[in-house]
Image (spheres, coloured by chain):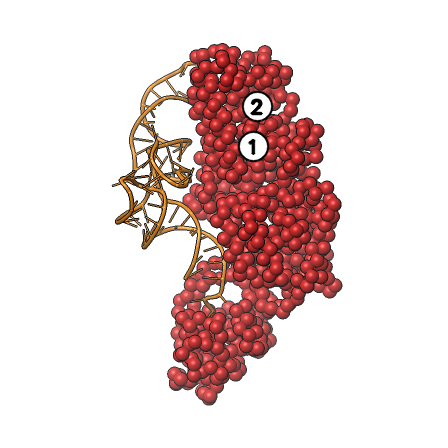
Amino acid sequence: MNVNEKLLKPYNPAEIEEKIYKLWEKSGYFNPDNLSKSYKLKTKSYCIVIPPPNITGSLHMGHALNAVIQDILIRQKRMQGHKTLWLPGTDHAGIATQNVVEKELKKQGLTRHNLGREKFIEKIWEWKKKYGNLILDQLKKLGASCDWSRLKFTMDPDYAKAVEIAFLHYYQKGWIYQGDRVVNWCPRCQTSLSDLELEYEDEKGKLWYIKYPLANFKFQDTNSKQIPNTNYIVVATTRPETMLGDVAVAVNPKDKRYKHLFGKTAILPIINREIPIIADQAVEMDFGTGAVKVTPGHDIIDAEIADRQKLPSYIVIDQYGKMTQEAGRDFEGLKILEARVKIVSILEKQGLIEKIEDYDLRIAKCYRCGSIIEPQKSKQWFLKMAELAKMAKDAVKKGKIKFHPKKWEKVYFDWLDNIKDWCISRQIWWGHKIPLQGVDDVLDTWFSSALWPFATLGWPNEKAKDLKEFYPTQVLSTARDIINLWVARMIFSSLEFMKKEPFKDIIINPTVLTRDGKRMSKSLGIGTNPMELIEKYGADAIRFGLIYQMMGGQDMHFSEEHCVAGKKFCNKIWNISRFVLTQIGNSKIQETNIKQILKSIPRRQAGKLQKEDKQILKKLEKIIKSVNKDLEQYRFGQALHIIYDFIWHEFADHYIEYSKNNKSEEIQNTLCFVFYTILRLLHPFMPFITEEIWHIMGFKNLLLIERWPQ
RNA sequence: GGGCGGCUAGCUCAGCUGGUCAGAGCGUCUCGUUUACACCGAGAAGGCCGAGGGUUCAAAUCCUUCGCCGCCCACCA
């Protein structure tokens, strides 16, 4: 089949993309070690490690956007002659994965406890084997040019070793300690969570104003409604059931209203425990009555108050969200809400409810299962953050690491400035076991992903070839919601273990929302599935659609129209190639001839060129500069707009039209040269179609490794 | 309580440090089968650039106040 016949067939992404991807993989050039075989490499290598998707995930628009961004950079750098590595991998995603597999079990009427720890973990491995790489296959469909031979998983044996070494390093340094504290507890996942693993939701709740009688008031008649004003103190609470664990009533030291009560004693209703009325600065005078009940067993702030004031603490709610023995016989075994109803009704009967107000609550929920978090006192492992946070801050302050856009560094600093020690233990089964005797807990999944930029390259083996060659990496591209959860932790981990920043630039992607500005949610069926888009328009069109819209905002209202535009653009390019190659002449289009034509490419100074020829060449030069500049500054949308406008409106609408009426050898050669350059420029953005045309043109080498226009 | 975005044609958005900046894509309308492309070409309609005030010879573009919409952080129970 000759060139014209190939091009006469309409562009069929599905068929071509699969073929081209196989061609790339077969070439081996995704692996940087093979690049030197094709041409002389620049001395500077270039590396991006992919933010490892969870093995539970399937590709969503955010992943797709991020993958395309990274692929553009990688492809450009590869074409520029850098030894380029895009290292792929997946994250075991502790709680998320455990939950998914638990759900599977539930369908069979089983729980993880039926199986036992070992069997359960086996099940997860089976599950991982079956579904864990789904998302990677999806990335391939998008055209991601990752070096799959270097694929990493956060539970690989060597990675596990790295995690263990890292933990022990901190431990020996005295930075890891065990503490009995109130932590965020998920009663469904049965584990502690860090502050960053909570999500907040607004809910309508109530604020109960409860009278706590003063100690000198003899409370005898439960039906009495004659409690004089001066004989009680009113506290406001959103969670009456926790009062069973109260150990004090606190007011602000400056609060004149309560000055006469400092040091006095109140009687905790129902329990009839004597509790002190104390002064503590944590209490806001303006809220409620200015007096707050102190429940150190179930509230982080209250625990801090109790710490300061040397108060005891009672656990009245257990880890499953049920009332404990310490809550008293009448309540033991009740669920939280049952206990709440019962308590409120008793208090009402006793005339101890002053009033009930509507109140908008901000409820903390588990980011993996959505259950309401119960702050719960428990034994956990913590990592001291003071030093690490300081290192992490310095790296960005000194400009060694830059956020793009810069504004996101504020989110980073805000968190680090107010950081608390990191609760790194989790009471789940799927994860890295804490490497200490007699501890069943596993590590926070983010503890292991914090090591990602160097553990993937061979650390702790400091002589590992990849580590030497590719660390530090250049770019981290990710979403803003994990700036602290992940990015900050990678930075301090890298500084601690590698003594060097893990990357120079952090690209924070816009969040992909629906066209109406809603958050995409698979479970709610809101949003677009990138795989369906690929089927509909082809991967290049999706890549185009995403990048064309990425103009630098913090949100992107994704609209499919731009994928339509991308598809049309593919068609345009396809037809341009048909025209150009026809003009150049069938007979000339053979491997050797094309190269010769390119060698004899007219330069602007060549005397035979007409005004139009010079113009198009000049414009081409100009847009090459702009595109390079935009890519350097990670302005992907702008770069693509420039290429698009040039190809369509300058090259096709003007020059090609001109060439129809004016035929000459120079024009032919100019057409050829411009087209040759366009294909290279466009390749990182739309790799499949450009590679296919390249292939049709008869080049021996892949466009994948053709030199980038400078 | 603190912070960050957005508000420009019907829709999704460009317009950085002020003076062809009133634009693109999609949609709509008119015309066109000129052999690369109708997934196209030529052209048209459509916006007082969220509101007010200010700076300036000149503002969508700078300052300020306000209004919506969205997001993030925080120990107001």
- Residue A4 vertical placement versus A63 (above, below): above
The residue that mark 1 highlights is A684
For the residues carrying marks 1 and 2, which lies nearer the camera in this image? 1
Badge 1: chain ID: A
Q: Secondary structure at mark 1?
A: loop
Label 1 to label 2, Cα distance in Å? 14 Å
- Residue A1 vertical placement versus A116 (above, below): above
The residue that mark 2 highlights is A693
Percent coordinates x, y for residue A681 in the rendering: 54, 29
Residue drawn at x 51%, y 45% as measured from the top left: A404
The quadrant holding residue A111 is bottom right
Badge 2: chain ID: A
Which one is in front, A94 or B14? B14
Percent coordinates x, y for residue A168 in the rendering: 71, 58
Residue drawn at x 52%, y 69% as measured from the top left: A301
The quadrant holding residue A40 is top right
Percent coordinates x, y for residue A606 in the rendering: 51, 15
Give the quadrant of the C terminus of chain A. Answer: top right
Residue drawn at x 51%, y 29% as measured from the top left: A624
| Chain in orange in the render | B
Q: Residues within 10 Å of mark 2 (few under 14, many from 20)?
A: many
Percent coordinates x, y for residue A525 in the rendering: 49, 46
| Chain in red in the render | A
